[in-house]
Image (cartoon, grey):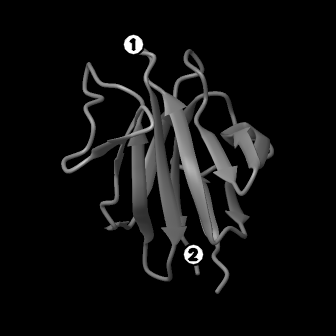
């Protein structure tokens, strides 16, 4: 079954649809420089958080409850449905990276015309 990810600026100025059945969101904490990865599956009623991986801890970046250390990463499988995921982009720190299969790009690489700052919301639009 295919998925369709809807992304919209919270200001309402722009929106995009990406034909993705699932994706990984990757970012680095601005203070701790700890990499965080979240894998989502796009379902008809929500984005389902299927895996969380964090390289270390500190300043609010603790591994999720029940995480197991695997190859230097704390890994958990919460299977949590999320109706809407909001990402705030400041332009001061490295952008979130959205990955699908082997294609990993900053959000602006997937979303033509995306401003450098502002919040975007991700949700299923199947």
What crowding class fits label 2: few (fewer than 14 Cα within 10 Å), some (14-19), or many (20 or more)? some
Query: Which corner quadrant of the image does residue 23 belong to?
Result: bottom right
- Residue 19 spot, x, y in % from top left: 72, 70
How much space separates mark 1 and mark 2, taking CA atoms? 34 Å
Which residue is at 64% across, 73% downward? Answer: 4
Q: Is residue 14 visible?
A: no
Query: Which corner quadrant of the image does residue 71 belong to?
Result: top left
Viewer-proximal residue among 66 and 117: 66
Which residue is at 40% across, 61% downward? Answer: 49
The mark that comes first in sequence, 1 or 2, is 1
- Element type at marker 2? loop
Q: Is residue 108 left or right of residue 93?
A: right
Q: Which mark is residue 125?
A: 2
Give the quadrant of the C terminus: bottom right
Q: Establish if 94 lies above or below 102.
A: above
- Residue 26 spot, x, y in % from top left: 55, 39
Q: Is residue 20 left or right of residue 57?
A: right
Residue bearing the label numbered 1:
31
């Amino acid at each position: 079954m295919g998925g369709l990810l809807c992304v919209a600026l919270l200001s309402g100025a722009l929106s995009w649809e990406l034909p993705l059945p699932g994706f990984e969101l990757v970012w680095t904490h601005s203070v701790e420089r700890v990499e965080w990865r979240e894998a989502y599956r796009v379902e008809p009623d929500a984005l389902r958080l299927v895996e969380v991986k964090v390289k270390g801890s500190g300043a609010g970046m603790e591994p999720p409850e029940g995480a197991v250390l695997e190859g230097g990463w704390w890994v958990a499988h919460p299977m949590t449905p999320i109706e809407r995921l909001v990402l705030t982009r400041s332009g001061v720190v490295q952008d979130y990276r959205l990955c699908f299969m082997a294609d990993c790009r900053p959000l602006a690489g997937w979303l033509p015309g995306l401003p450098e700052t502002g919040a975007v919301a991700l949700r299923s639009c199947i």
